[in-house]
C-alpha cells in the first residue's frame, strides 16, 4: 500500500469538512497549475494533472501525511518543473525562500485577525 492509499484505514480524528478562506499563496498555487497545464498555450502544456498526481503520490509518507492540500500541489509542481529543466535549482531556492517568508507573513496576519 502506498502512502496516498488510505481508503478504509481507521482514523482517530474526524475529517474536517468546513472550507477555509484561501490564503493568497494557495490561490497563486492554483493559478500556477492552470498556467503549467494550459494546453492552449504555444508549445502545449508544461505538465499534466496526471503528472501532478504522480508527484503527490510519490512523496515520502511523512510529507504526504503532514502537508496540506496546496502544499502537496506546490511540492509536486516543483518536482516536475525541475525534472523537466523548466527552472534551475538555484532559481527555485531563491524564489522558494521568498515565498516561505511571504507565507509566514500571511499566516501571521491571519492569526492576528482572529
Image (cartoon, rainbow, N blue to C red):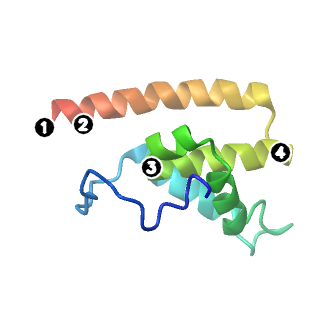
Q: Is residue 86 visible?
A: no
Is mark 1 in CB contact (under 8 Å) with mark 2? yes
Work out how far the residue at label 3 is from the one at label 1, CA to CA, in angstroms. 19 Å
Identity of the residue drawn at 55% across and 57% down: 4
Classify 3 as above or below 62: below
Identity of the residue drawn at 24% across and 36% down: 110
Q: Earlier in the sequence, mark 1 or mark 4?
A: 4
Q: Is residue 40 visible?
A: yes
Q: Earlier in the sequence, mark 3 or mark 4?
A: 3
Q: Earlier in the sequence, mark 2 or mark 3?
A: 3
Work out how far the residue at label 1 is from the one at label 4, CA to CA, in angstroms. 40 Å
Is mark 3 in CB contact (under 8 Å) with mark 1? no
Work out how far the residue at label 2 is from the one at label 4, CA to CA, in angstroms. 34 Å
Q: Dot 1: within a 10 Å radius of its alpha carbon, few (fewer than 14), some, or many (20 or more) residues?
A: few
Find residue 42 and report its horizontal and vertical position in percent.
83, 68
Find residue 57 and report its horizontal and vertical position in percent.
63, 55
Figure quadrant of the N terminus: bottom right
Q: Dot 3: within a 10 Å radius of its alpha carbon, few (fewer than 14), some, or many (20 or more) residues?
A: some
Q: Earlier in the sequence, mark 3 or mark 1?
A: 3
Residue under pointer 1: 114
Work out how far the residue at label 2 is from the one at label 3, CA to CA, in angstroms. 14 Å
Residue under pointer 4: 83
Residue under pointer 3: 26
Say what secondary structure mark 2 lies in. helix
Work out how far the residue at label 3 is from the one at label 4, CA to CA, in angstroms. 23 Å
Residue under pointer 2: 110
Q: Dot 4: within a 10 Å radius of its alpha carbon, few (fewer than 14), some, or many (20 or more) residues?
A: few
Classify 38 as above or below 111: below
**Label drawn at residue 60:** none
The picture quadrant where one finds residue 8 is: bottom left
Amino acid at each position: 500500500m502506498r502512502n496516498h492509499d488510505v481508503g478504509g484505514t481507521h482514523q482517530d480524528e474526524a475529517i474536517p469538512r468546513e472550507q477555509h478562506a484561501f490564503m493568497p499563496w494557495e490561490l497563486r498555487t492554483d493559478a500556477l497549475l492552470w498556467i503549467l497545464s494550459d494546453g492552449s498555450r504555444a508549445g502545449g502544456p508544461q505538465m499534466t494533472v496526471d503528472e501532478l498526481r504522480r508527484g503527490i503520490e510519490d512523496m515520502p509518507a511523512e510529507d504526504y501525511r503532514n502537508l496540506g492540500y496546496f502544499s502537496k500541489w506546490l511540492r509536486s509542481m516543483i518536482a516536475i518543473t525541475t525534472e523537466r529543466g523548466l527552472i534551475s535549482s538555484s532559481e527555485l531556492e531563491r524564489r522558494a525562500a521568498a515565498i516561505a517568508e511571504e507565507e509566514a507573513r500571511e499566516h501571521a496576519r491571519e492569526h492576528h485577525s482572529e
